[in-house]
Image (cartoon, rainbow, N blue to C red):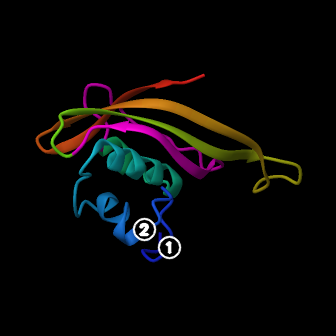
Amino acid sequence: MDDAARCPCLSGLPYGECCGPLHAGARPAATAEALMRSRYSAFAVGDAPYLLQTWHPTTRPASLELDHDQQWRRLDVLATRGGPFDDDGEVEFVATFRSGAGPGGPGRLHERGQLHEVSRFVREGGRWFYVDGDIAG
């Protein structure tokens, strides 16, 4: 992704100043929310290795296949807990997506949906990790 492009997490910053450095390993996320935003952006740009790297080892899957027909369109953070000096945190968010081959075949997105989740995070060794989440109704 172009560093000058708007970051997919919709922070208002360019990708190169927001989630890009986290994806590149140049710096760790400072808060649970920053990690959640960077993970959302990783889904948006298709960075499965970053997602696995930031998943806590106790809950991390052995592998991760991303759905390339799914386009993440919007992120709304509803509530957050877990600052730079905390050891755990939670982030409630709604992520909006479009997916599936619609009328006209592949490349025509037709299904719209939302993922509403409360994600849990822990900070170990100065790094935040995604542990798991509850899907909200």
Magenta segment: does it hold 78?
yes
Question: Which x, y percent locates residue 59?
Answer: 32, 26
Residue pushed farthest left? 125
Mark earlier in primary sequence (1, 2): 1
Residue found at x 34% / y 58%: 23
- Which element carries disc 1, helix, strand or loop? loop
Between 50 and 128, the one lying in front of the other is 128
Count neighbours of disc 1 (C-alpha within 10 A) and say few if under 14, some if 14 to 19, many if 20 or more: few
Which numbered marker is on residue 25?
none
Q: Quadrant of residue 32?
A: top left
Count neighbours of disc 2 (C-alpha within 10 A) and say few if under 14, some if 14 to 19, many if 20 or more: many
Which numbered marker is on residue 15?
2
Question: Which x, y percent locates residue 19?
Answer: 37, 60
Residue pushed farthest right? 103
Magenta-drawn segment:
54-83
Which numbered marker is on residue 5?
1
> From the viewer's perspective, is 44 left or right of 64?
right
Residue found at x 27% / y 38%: 82
- Mark 1 is on which residue type? Ala
